[in-house]
Each structure stands twice: as structure tokens, then as C-alpha cells.
Amino acid sequence: MSTHAPRPSYAAVLRVPHARRTFAAALVGRLSYGTVSLALMLSLTRSTGSYAVAGTVLAIFGATGVFLSPYRAALVDRHGPRRALLPMALLYAALLCTLAAVCRQPGTPAAVLAATAAFAGACTPPLGPTMRAVWAELLPDRAMLQRAYSLDGVAEELLFVSGPLLVGVVIGFAPPTAGVVLSAVLVAAGTLAFVTSPAAGVLRPASRAKDDSAPSGRGGAGQGRALLQPVVVAACVGISLSAVDLLVVAFAAQRGLGGGAVAWVLAALSAGSAVGGLLNGAITWSSSARARLPFLAAGLGVCLVAAGLASGVGTLVVAVACAGLFVAPALTTTYLIADESAAPGHRTRAGAWVNTAVNAGGSAGAAAVGLLVERLPLPVCFAVSGAVAVAAALVPGRRRARVRRAAGTAQSSSEPESSEPESSESESECESSERSAVTFPVFRSTRQSCSALPEDRVSTSQAASPSP
């Protein structure tokens, strides 16, 4: 921990040795996730001539990608990114190219398309969780980590906006399958550059003994309880966000507005999220991440309830933009909590559980709100989507017992949670007094301390982004 360093900034994060190269490589690979969905949907639709078949195959691709994410992340934790992530990415790229090839063959059976898509989704490399684990090892303190996660989340937001635009450019002079091949090239090239960067070497493979013993017993149960709050909140945020997409479409349809109005409203949501993420990273909070998370979730919910009262598209844009201000901060905070809750050798997996929760919540929310829109007034639907986020704020936060290293030997992670150091409060006051930035005294947590992370890290910390 570097208490003598100047106030962290986004520029300071990128000045960390090898950070720019590693982050840029990860973003190139993650851009694939912004291009593949649209390219694959267009390819499948052209190949089968059926929206139902295309939607089903795409859903299978997404389901295997989302629900197997923690297990793929476990492979990275166990074997390290160089031995696990690169083979995974190359296999994923090869399967995408195979899928593009079968889409170009007229009359390909739907079962073949579905099976190929399922295998491809199952091999999706967890670049987002792995990059966040690298941030956690590279950066010396929580303030730097918070800024890194905020930067990561905003950059990912831009990737998912620019990805479809890139596909649109490609299909202007090539068939849609070229977009699928482009996705394969991006993920292969980005992952190769990522794993060969010096920073990727800070993620050392966990020993099998430690990896096998950590999830069992009281230590594993404590880690699971500590992850409950960020995982549930992430899932509820995913539900609320997916509901907004469909509710905005329904709002425009009821008032006879065109697709342009929908685009403006959803753009306001993304812009609000980006601004909120940057502000969240720039603020030096005096409260712990667990103390802030309920207020962020509740803020999102209240803004969505207010959006249901909008009388026109202008007021809806304002309400949705305000809701967006809470999205990136909430997700960034869930990743921070997941990191501090993770046992050594489980950081990538902990982040992947949060990632899975966001995506699974998004899928569930889209299905649920589709049923509600046909049965309830729009203001009620907005209120329900907001209530989900508010309900997430009620999930109690519980810290995992911290793992410490004494004289170079790690203590057991199954230490009872009541064994908080007596000097925790005084350490927090020490850290706060050395900050040169203006701090926010509200929501102060006396449990926050200078040693809020396990001390057996080479360089501590970690932060946010929803992606495969």
C-alpha cells in the first residue's frame, strides 16, 4: 500500500508499468464481444431465413457463454492466463470461423448451427474478469483500483456501442459472416497480445492444494456469503437494465414515436453510465464499497420508478440519464467487493460470478418484462423494474475473513469473520487523513481499513464491467 503517493488519477493508473499495453490488448479482444452478437444474428438470419431459428441459436450461444463463465475463469485461476486463456481464445476463434463457414452453406440443419454455437459459446475466454484480476495485482491501493475499474467499465461501455457500428461498416462491403470472422480475429489477436504482456505474468497459477481446499469448510462458506451481496445486486441491475430497453421501445410505440426516439433514450442511459463511472472513479470515498452499494442500487431503482412518470420523451431522457449515473458505479462496486471477498487464487472466478449474474439477470429481465408489458400499464412496469433494484439494496453485506501472510506464510482463509483487527478503525483514519482530495463523509463505515484486502498479494486490489 502506498500511503505516500500523490492522489491517484486515471492518468496515474495508465502510467503503471505495462498497464497501457495490457489494457489495450484486453480491449482489442473484448471488442469481439461487441461485434459478435449482431454479426452472428445477421449471418444466421440470412442462412436460415428464420428469425425464430436465428434467435434460438443465438440464445444457445449466449447461454453457454454466460453460465459456464465461472468454470472457465476457474481454469485461469488454476493454470494462469498463459496456459488457460490463450488456448481457450484460439479454440473460440476457430469455432467462430467454423460457425461462419456453416452459415455460408445454404440448407445447413438448425441442429448443426445450434451445436456449433453451443461449443463456441462454451469456449468464450473470460478476458474481462482476467483483466480485472490483473488490475488487482498491478495497483498498490484501493483508490487506484477503484479508478482502474471505473476506467475499465467505461471503456467496455464504449466497446459495446462501437462494436455494432464496426459490424455495420463491414457488412457494407462484405457478407455478415465477415463480421463473425472479424470477431474471431479480434479475440485471437487481443488475447495473444494480452497473455504475452509482462503484466499478465503477475497472475500466478494457484496451487492445486490451495485451490481445492479454499472452497471447502468454513472459509469457502464465508467466501460464498461474502459474494452474496455483489452477485445479487449485479443480477438485479441486469434485470432492471434489460427491462429498460424493452420499456423504452414500448413507450415510443404507445406515443407513435419512431426508432430515433428509442435510440436517443438508450444513448442517454449509456452516456449517464459513462459519466457516473468516471465520477465514481474520481471521488475519494470515505465509506466502504459494501456501505455504498445499497445506496447505488436504490438510486438506480428510484430513477427508474421516476422514469415511469415521464410525460414525454424529453423527460424520459432525463430520467433514464439519471438512472445511468448509478449503473457503472454500482457494477464497479460489485467487482470491488468481489475482489476483496476472493481467496487467493480465486480472484478471476469471483469476478466471473458477478459477470455471470449481470448477464443472467439481463436475460431473465428481458423475458419477464416482455410478459408484464402486455398485461400492465407502462408506469407500473417501470416501477416493477425499479423495485427490483431497490430490493437488491436490502441484501446484507458480509465480509469474508481476511487472509493474511505472516513471515511469508499464508494463514488459513477459514479464520472466523469476527477476527477483525482492533486497529481497523485507526488505520482507516490514518488513510483518510493522508488523502489530499476532498472526501465524502456520508455513509462512513468504521470497518473500512487500510488493509481491506488480503495482504498476501504481490500488489493489491480490483474493479468493474459487465461482459462475457
Image (tube, rainbow, N blue to C red):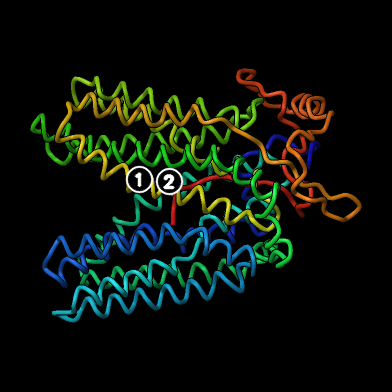
From this viewpoint, which residue is outermost toward the left? 256
- The residue lying at 82 percent from left, 50 percent from top is 411
* Three-letter residue code for mark 1: Gly
Number of marks: 2
Judged left or right of residue 39, residue 233 is: right
* Residue 378 x, y percent position in the rendering: 19, 27
- The residue lying at 61 percent from left, 18 percent from top is 442
* Discs 1, 2 touching: Cβ within 8 Å: yes
- Which image quarter holds the N terminus? top right
Q: Residues within 10 Å of mark 1 (few under 14, many from 20)?
A: many
- The residue lying at 53 percent from left, 45 percent from top is 464
Question: Which residue is nearer to you in this view: 240 or 315?
Answer: 240
Pointer 2: what residue? 358
- Which image quarter holds the C terminus? bottom left
Pointer 1: what residue? 362
* Residue 104 x, y percent position in the rendering: 20, 78
Residue 246, picture quadrant: top left
* Residue 447 x, y percent position in the rendering: 72, 28
Q: Is residue 435 above or below residue 95?
A: above
